[in-house]
Image (cartoon, helix red, strand yellow):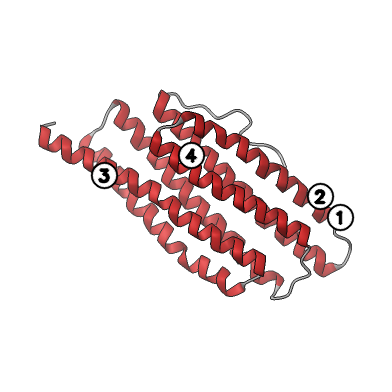
Amino acid sequence: MTDKIRIQYQEELNHLEAQALGAFDLVVRALDRTLEAIEHQDIQLAELVAADDDRIDGRYLETHQGLITLLATQSPVATDLRLISALLHVIKNAERMGDQCVNICKLIPIVGHEPPAEESMVRRILEMGTQARSQIIQAKTAFADRDEAAAQDLVRQDDLIDQLNRECFNLAIEIGDEHDRREWAMTMLLAARAIERIGDNAVDVGEQVAFVVTGLFREFEDASHPI
């Protein structure tokens, strides 16, 4: 490449990385609204999250196309090729996180405006969401800083989400035989599972950090656990 072309290429790659990582800001906003909708059983807010998911999908499509175009026109090699490959995974994980928020928000209208909510279960789900929010932010920062230690630490945080998810499952079993309460509990279990998947997506981003830094892909130890 000539120097000018090389500079333009590097600027475009930097722009695409910023674009991909910026998707996590959109996800954090969606998750914040999702948790508020859960806490207050706010059907209108839940519908807003679902409608606003087009912004995350649009960011995914735009960034994905930009990365593919860069691959096709510039034929990157070595470190740059590794980065582009990682960014394709990163933006896909962000898009999946947004989808999980939508999945949760689609559950909220099912249980109605005044469901027979169990406070202890709602509290644990909100704790899961807060932990997932922290993971999203840390995953973004770890990738931007190429911080492998911070990426690896996402596994520890994910363990906390998994434990809360198991507690939600146990609470759902103990909630009693009343039909409305059991229906609500089963719905909230699906919400908890979706948040657990957001945590897994954050760990996946962390694995891409390690790939960019080392050139070797590996799944982090204990990144996934059975419920």
Quadrant of the drawing holding the N terminus: top left
On screen, residue 172 above or below 110: above
N-term-proximal mark, 1 vs 3:
3
Q: CA distance from mark 2 to mark 1?
A: 6 Å
Query: Marks 2 and 3: which is nearer the front?
Result: 2
* Viewer-nearest residue: 7 or 193: 7
Q: Which residue is mark 1?
A: 174
- Circle 4 packing at 10 Å, graded few (<14), some (14-19), many (20+), is many
Q: Which residue is mark 4?
A: 205
Quadrant of the drawing holding the C terminus: top right
Q: Position of residue 11 (x, y in %)?
A: 22, 42
Picture disc at residue 89 = none
N-term-proximal mark, 2 vs 3:
3
Label 4 close to label 1 by CB (< 8 Å): no
- Circle 2 packing at 10 Å, graded few (<14), some (14-19), many (20+), is few
Three-letter code, disc 2: Asn
Helix, strand or loop at disc 2? helix
Q: Which residue is mark 2?
A: 170
Helix, strand or loop at disc 1? loop
* Viewer-nearest residue: 216 or 31: 31
Three-letter code, disc 3: Thr
Q: Which residue is mark 3?
A: 69
On screen, residue 163 above or below 39: above
Residue 104 shown left or right of residue 18 in the figure: right
N-term-proximal mark, 3 vs 4:
3
Three-letter code, disc 4: Val
On screen, residue 117 above or below 129: below
Residue 167 shown left or right of residue 193 in the figure: right
